[in-house]
Image (spheres, grey):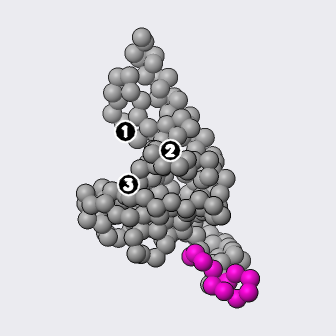
Amino acid sequence: MKSLHLFCFLLFLSIAPGSSGATESGGEPAPYPAAYLPTSGWLVGPASLRTTPGIPFPCVMMNQYDNGDSLRFAGTDQKLLTLAVTLRRPVFIPAHRYGVGLAIAPSFDIKTEGYAYDPTTLIINLHTGPALRPLIKDTESLLVMLDQSTPLRFSLIGTADGLTRMDRCYREQKNTQNKQNPS
């Protein structure tokens, strides 16, 4: 069974656009690396198991990628609050700020800052910048540029479903809290 999965994955890589050093028309190198692929569907759940009366916690949708990195979007109903990028290797100094760029072709490109939570995780505030949520819902990938390092391109396949489930998670928490703490 494992060999079948490996065969299908290798077949996909051999026909996927940009997966083998593909070039744009005209022979120029592609401007961004091929996208890392998620290892499963988006996992969704509350950001915390702890409850605070009257305050529902955001929910999180998370995916791990075939390169070992992961993305976690935290949000409430129809709003994204943060993006956590966890790398497979320690590169950050905890509590330091790092320049980060986020891009979605063809028109979304912002420069912002991220906060190193630990040596492998950078947390990016999304609730004060331009609305990223409508863009990630229907796009193929998100490009993350960390300071001077090579850009990381993450496939966002299945994001629309993940966002729908994240909204439902938040509403269910809110409804549960309202039932437990009627006004």
Query: Extreme top residue here?
Result: 183
Q: Which amino acid does label 2 sit on?
A: Leu
Quadrant position of the N terminus in the picture: bottom right
Q: What's the mark number on residue 80?
A: 2
Q: Which amino acid does label 1 sit on?
A: Ser
Residue that carries the numbered disc 1 in the rendered image:
48
Residue in the image at 56% along x and 38% along y: 78
Q: Which amino acid does label 3 sit on?
A: Ile
**Up-down relation of residue 27 to residue 78 (above or below):** below
| Residue at mark 1 to residue at mark 2: CA–CA distance | 16 Å
Q: Check disc 3 and report its element: helix, strand or loop.
A: strand
Mark 3 or 2 closer to N-term? 2
**Residues at marks 3 and 2 touching, judged by CB atoms closer than 8 Å:** no
Relative to the observer, which residue lies in front, 129 or 40? 129
Q: Check disc 1 and report its element: helix, strand or loop.
A: loop
- Residue stretch rendered in magenta on the structure: 23-33
